[in-house]
Amino acid sequence: MNDCLFCRIVAREIPADVVHETDRTLAFRDVNPQAPTHVLVVPKEHHATAGLLVGADPQLLADVVASAHAVAVQEGLVTDDGAEPGYRLVANTGPAAGQTVHHLHLHVLGGRPLTWPPG
């Protein structure tokens, strides 16, 4: 998609601080971080929401989650086999949830205590 910000980042038309990449996913630092670690993980293919992606390619959704965990390990938010100290995954879906870029993306947040409920 020509007008999708994340598609343009995947195509390297817009620079980003890439921290992890696979053949199907790309992870880069958020330009407006909400925690010490705030990385966005996107599928390289355009899918607007998690629901649309799971309907089209469930394995790709699993790959996005696996990449998010790999980022958390890389960033020191968890060990390979544990949940300490921890991280949060967020996927906003639709305008009422605050989705502003309509290309599925997981926020990997960590590095500080994250309270519940979120904003």
Image (tube, grey):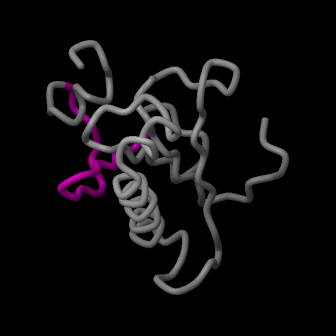
Direction top: furthest residue: 3
Q: Position of residue 57 (x, y in %)?
A: 35, 48
Q: Position of residue 117 (x, y in %)?
A: 84, 46
Q: Position of residue 81 (x, y in %)?
A: 52, 86
Q: Answer with the quarter of the image where residue 88 lies.
A: bottom right
Q: Any magenta on residue 116?
A: no
- Residue 32 located left or right of residue 25: right
Residue 13 lies, with reference to residue 63, above or below; the image says: above
Q: Which residue is pictured at 45% across the width and 23% down the height? A: 101
Residue 119 lies, with reference to residue 73, above or below; the image says: above
Between 68 and 74, which is closer to the camera in this rendering?
68
Q: Which quarter of the image is occupied by the N terminus?
A: top left
- Residue 37 located left or right of residue 27: right
Residue 68 lies, with reference to residue 15, above or below; the image says: below
Between 97 and 20, which is closer to the camera in this rendering?
97
Direction right: furthest residue: 117
Q: Answer with the quarter of the image where residue 98 lies.
A: top right
Q: Which residue is pictured at 34% across the width and 53% down the height? A: 60
Q: Any magenta on residue 22?
A: yes
Q: Which residues are magenta?
A: 14-30
Between 55 and 79, which is closer to the camera in this rendering?
55
Q: Position of residue 114 (x, y in %)?
A: 74, 54
